[in-house]
Image (cartoon, rainbow, N blue to C red):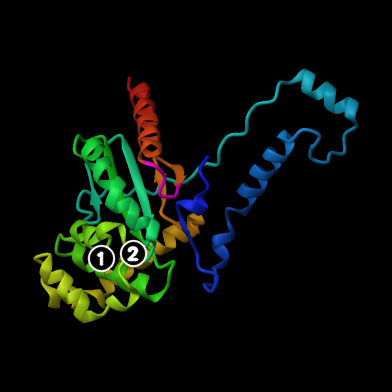
């Protein structure tokens, strides 16, 4: 399994985490115990005698622990301007991203176009974005600008523009003047975008996305839920394809 350190950007050390970001810790502990139990010569402490443990193993074969269940967070709103793909698509990918995340920019520039062509365009995949503020004020400003662009139907173009060439924009570039210029270059109304960034509608939308990510314990970007299956990091295209194909096969098998 690929290390997420190489494919995902983590929360900066200087950023204080809200208490509810600690929710997944029990899950981490369970996984750690399972791994520990598989190391030769190692076993979790138990109050049972060795003979009792051996008998229990013989009596009932061990069953693998079920993966943690993630809640359904896809919105499937046909009017969602920050999503692409049919609401009837059998696979829904919720993407937690940050405009100041280098790995997010690389994924958007290199992997997203291929997934769009192969799965989104034929109705098999829907992608819904949740832009976060993990990297601070510049991230928050960019997320609000993205939502403001969405009000003009320009979110996807804006998203690609800020990830152009697989590179993030410098934090100093997120001024009203710079965002105005980007909007105008994309055929949007620059004045309206800058004004809408400060609106309650835009701020509420951004905070809703941030709250959702925090409730799931998202600590790094990009992170994804592919039909409620967690997927962390800008992993190779083949890994995304395998995950999507598995969900497509599952959806087909569940059809009457």
Q: Compare marks 2 and 1 and give the one earlier in the sequence.
A: 2
- Residue 22 placement: quadrant: bottom right
Q: Residues within 10 Å of mark 2 (few under 14, many from 20)?
A: many
Give SS at disc 2. loop
Above or below, 168 against 4 in this view is below
The residue that appears at 50% across and 43% down in the rendered structure is 2
The residue that appears at 33% across and 64% down in the rendered structure is 99
Highlighted range, magenta: 232-236
Nearer to us: label 2 or label 1:
2
Can you see residue 88? Answer: no
Check disc 1 and report the residue beneath it: 146
Q: Are marks 2 and 1 in contact (CB under 8 Å)?
A: yes
Residue farthest toward the left in the current orientation of the protein? 187
Question: From the viewer's perspective, is 110 left or right of 227?
Answer: left
Q: Residues within 10 Å of mark 1 (few under 14, many from 20)?
A: many
Can you see residue 32? Answer: yes
Check disc 2 and report the residue beneath it: 99
Picture coordinates of residue 185, whole percent (x, y): 11, 68
Give SS at disc 1. helix
């Amino acid at each position: 399994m690929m290390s997420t350190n190489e494919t995902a950007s983590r929360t900066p050390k200087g950023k204080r985490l809200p208490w509810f970001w600690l929710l997944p810790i029990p899950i981490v502990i369970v996984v750690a115990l399972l791994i520990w139990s598989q190391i030769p010569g190692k076993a979790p402490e138990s109050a049972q005698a060795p003979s009792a443990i051996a008998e229990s193993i013989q009596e009932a074969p061990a069953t693998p622990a079920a993966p943690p269940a993630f809640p359904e967070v896809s919105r499937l709103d046909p009017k969602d301007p920050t999503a692409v793909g049919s609401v009837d698509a059998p696979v829904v990918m919720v993407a937690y991203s940050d405009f100041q995340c280098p790995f997010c920019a690389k994924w958007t520039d290199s992997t997203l176009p291929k997934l769009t062509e192969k799965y989104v365009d034929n109705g098999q995949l829907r992608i819904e974005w949740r832009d976060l503020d993990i990297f601070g004020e510049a991230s928050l400003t960019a997320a609000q600008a993205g939502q403001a662009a969405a009000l003009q139907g320009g979110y996807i173009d804006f998203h690609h523009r800020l990830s152009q060439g697989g590179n993030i924009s410098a934090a100093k570039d997120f001024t009203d003047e710079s965002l105005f210029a980007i909007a105008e270059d994309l055929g949007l109304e620059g004045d309206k975008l800058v004004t809408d960034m400060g609106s309650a509608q835009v701020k509420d939308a951004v905070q809703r996305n941030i709250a959702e990510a925090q409730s799931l314990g998202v600590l790094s970007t990009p992170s994804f839920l592919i039909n409620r299956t967690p997927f962390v990091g800008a992993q190779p295209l083949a890994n995304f394809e395998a995950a999507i194909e598995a969900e497509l096969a599952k959806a087909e098998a569940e059809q009457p």
